[in-house]
Image: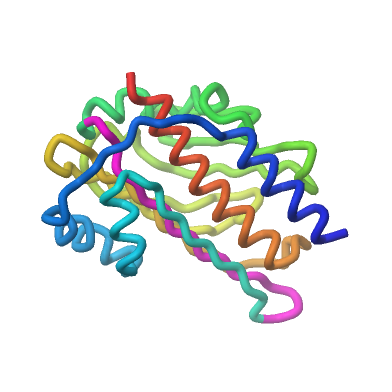
Amino acid sequence: MRYRFFVLLVSFFINDFSFAQEKVSLSPGFGDSVARELAPFSPLSRGQLEELLKGQVVSSGKVSSPSDSEQEMLLFVAGVHPRNCTRAMRKLSLYENYHNYLDFIKTSQYDEQSQRFAFVIDHALMPFPMSVRFKIPRIKGPGRYPFTFEDGFLKDLRGTVVVSELGKFCLMGLKTDWRGPDTKIPDVIFSTFIQTVGKMGLEHLIRVSLF
């Protein structure tokens, strides 16, 4: 049953987010800059660096169970946007519109004064809706932006968003880590889910923010 759920879940995201996307193609000379910017978040393998320079989104997720009652999650996602950061973030900074950008986000709200971003992730193949809320400024340009999930699913998750100019392109990355109560989702399914959602999600956000 678990493996059937796993196959259905992965198939949903692959089919739902399949599209032709404009991609960058960077010379190897950009490799040092990319590796240096992302080093504080996750050391890149040679394969990951080559994929980024070819305009691919890289995503790595790991979920483990340090005890019978706990789970631990690590996620790293990065990609290069074909536009500069200011242009790319014009649309991506509109957090309240994310439910229009990504089908698996059912509601999205942002409070300008408190800088709190709240959204609900849900789909028929998921065991239950995942509600998250965290504080983050509107990201309109380059910088490093830490955030913490304040409540709901994955409460106390900590992460950082990095946005960096890369010539006429924009390097985007996200790193999160969390340890908390067992979610009742098997590690292998949870790991594949976050890695797939991270990759497909950033690919789709890049696509919708091209124009």
Q: Is residue 209 left or right of residue 152?
A: left
Does 71 appear in magenta? Answer: yes
Number of marks in the rendered image: 0
Q: Principal SS element in the magenta part?
A: strand
Q: Nearer the viewer, residue 88 or 160?
A: 88
Residue at 82 percent across and 60 percent down: it is 2
Q: Quadrant of the C terminus?
A: top left
Q: Quadrant of the N terminus?
A: bottom right
Quarter of image, res 41: bottom left
Residue 196: image location, x then y, percent: 57, 50
Q: Is residue 23 above or below residue 65?
A: above
Residue lying furthest bottom: 67
Residue 7: image location, x then y, percent: 74, 52
Residue at 47 percent across and 33 percent down: it is 204
Magenta segment: 67-83
Q: Is residue 107 left or right of residue 167?
A: right
